[in-house]
Amino acid sequence: MKKLFLSTLILSCVFSTQALAAFADGGAKFLGNITTSGQIREDFNTYWNQITAENGCKWGSIHSLDSSGKSKFSWDNYDKCESAYKWAKEKPGERFFKFHALIWGSQVPNFLCKNKNPGITVEKTRQYIVEWFDAVAAKFPDLEYIDVVNEAIWAGDNYHSGYGKPAAGAEGNTTDDPECGGTHIIDALGGDEVINGKHQYNFITTAFKMARERWPKAVLIYNDYNTLSWQMNEGIELIQTIVKNGAPVDVYGQQAHDCKGMSKSDFESKLTRIHNETGLPLMISEYDIGEADDTKQKNDYANHIPFMWETEWIAGITIWGYINGATWAQNTGIIDNGRDRAAMTWLKEYFASNLDKGKNTTGIGGGEVVDPVPQAPYNGSAAKAPGKVEAEHFDIAGVGKGNNSYSDGDSENQGDANFRINEPVDIYKGGTGMVLGYTEPGEWLEYTVNFDTDGAYSFFANVSAGNEGSSLNLYVDDALVIEELAIPQTGEENWDTYEKVGAQIANISKGEHVVKLEVVGGYFNIDYLTFVAGANAEDPEPNSGVGGNEDPSAIAGNLHLNVNQLGDYDVFDMQGVYIGRLSAYSMEQAVSTIKHSDFISAKGTYFIKSKNTGKVQSIRLIR
């Protein structure tokens, strides 16, 4: 969300081609900014290697009608849309341009407004949308990044921007025209069906499919605000819904206008949750901190920017303005009357010393893509089953999507064991030595385990819980084998007493498998896992950790799944067109098959859907 800014000053900043190194040149992803009051400043390429026209590429800035009612397009009228594009194209592969935005409920052409043009119809609006998409494609056929749909989350009783009626806007700053009276954009793109109280966002799916038809190689972005604070859940649900419905969305853009004063741990845990639950790379699309106090603004930059830069699934960063007084909101600039504010000074120092810390395994966002590295067993070889696996000996994470070995709710190891301190999993002293604690719902850990024989296994876990409602899931090679195994309260507000819980796994084949433990109901501590060959087998260590007293009735046959049973996986392209079906033992194996075979020959983003579970996963192929 951003406000149309008209400066009262005449700026002398003009387009420049001076060859200066930007902060992120040679790094793993871009660090960009926006045009300044319609201009590309002389110092722009001193700092930034990606550009977004703040207002110049918006529909209302370009599309109008002539006296006969025919569409006409002005590409460099205000805010230099075409100039920004040309600036990036001067150095392809080194500079990057993002088109902002194709569909937005604000700053639309006046002829789309119901009050200003009472004769406008759904059919006519659809015609104008097609003309708009076609005109952009003709002008910029090789766009790399596109904000396809902007600010369409349904929150309360309205969308984030004025698709139907004026909306409040980010930070209460709206660019909606109160005299517009809404538009027919949603209906023209297929409507927004509501099923069981949930918006289906059909119009967003349609817009993305239209964009993919015109730009088959572009990175297509859904962009919105308040996604790190008030409407995080709604934003996640929107992405999950449009992906399920076949929208070819590649990236979820986080405007991050809502991060003022947000702590480092809060910022990191929220982005991690959004990434994990949507399954998409993220892009920090409009970051700024509106703060008059230089030190406070700098502290927020220092708390947020390193995670953006050093996290592999964040594809790029765009700061939303850098000149104080020439940005959409007060005090968001980091240069004030020619003076670097503390945040700008910090940025210069950080990138001068930490450029090589940037990570990017998304395949997008500029820079060099790091080759994927698979996860590996903690001790160099797989744990043995039958046998005991210490909970803190989860696999070492690899590099690249699908090679993580854990997911933790925050970025810091909050434990006291001084073990694996550079990893965020919380490891404490306790139990029989060390335990995993402060477990939150949705967190998970993976262990490579070598099973000695085919057949059924009994599973045991040494656990403690100071509260009720704790539980876990267990997966083997992505197949759920134990569902919501209950963990009893071992003491009121006491996590020092440990008990054994257990269940049965119907069948596992001999050999190495990846075992995943997922936290369903927090919060509990876990000391170790034990696998014993055979159904209803006895635990070889019946005396659990500290104060343990095993309850044999807890050893239940929860599920009877054959984890080695072949399943069918359907593959679709980003337009929802069926590509074909393959068989695999797990989603991971299906993904690997597609990556390393000629099942799909063309690069692009595809979706894989399990026929058994309905689970959907996206995969981006770079051939």
Image (tube, rainbow, N blue to C red):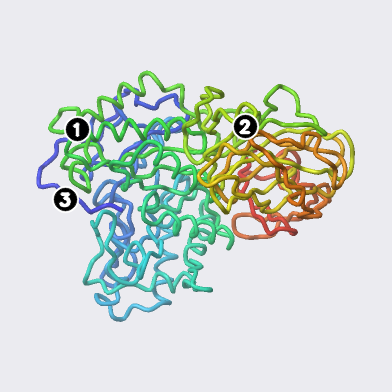
Is disc 3 in contact with disc 1, using a CB cutoff of under 8 Å?
no
Query: Which residue lies under the disc numbered 3?
Result: 6
Amino acid type assigned to the residue bearing label 1 in the image: Asp
Q: Position of residue 255 (x, y in %)?
A: 36, 48
- Of 540 and 402, the residue lying toward us: 540
Q: Nearer the viewer, mark 2 or mark 3?
A: 2
Residue at image location 89% in from the left, 36% down from the top: 453
Residue at image location 52% in from the left, 28% down from the top: 368
- Of mark 2 and mark 1, the one earlier in the sequence is 1
Amino acid type assigned to the residue bearing label 2 in the image: Gly
Q: Secondary structure at mark 3?
A: loop
- Of 131 and 198, the residue lying toward us: 198
Query: Which residue lies under the disc numbered 1?
Result: 294
In this rendering, the answer to whether 506 lies above or below 15 is below
Is disc 2 in contact with disc 3, using a CB cutoff of under 8 Å?
no
Q: Position of residue 421 (x, y in %)?
A: 52, 24
Query: Which residue lies under the disc numbered 2?
Result: 431
Give the crowd class for mark 3: few <14, some 14-19, many >=20 residues within 10 Å. Answer: few
Give the crowd class for mark 1: few <14, some 14-19, many >=20 residues within 10 Å. Answer: some
- Spatial distance from mark 3 to mark 1, Cα to Cα? 25 Å
Q: Position of residue 146 (x, y in %)?
A: 44, 49
Q: Is residue 549 left or right of residue 585?
A: left
Marker disc for residue 604: none
Q: Position of residue 361 (x, y in %)?
A: 55, 34
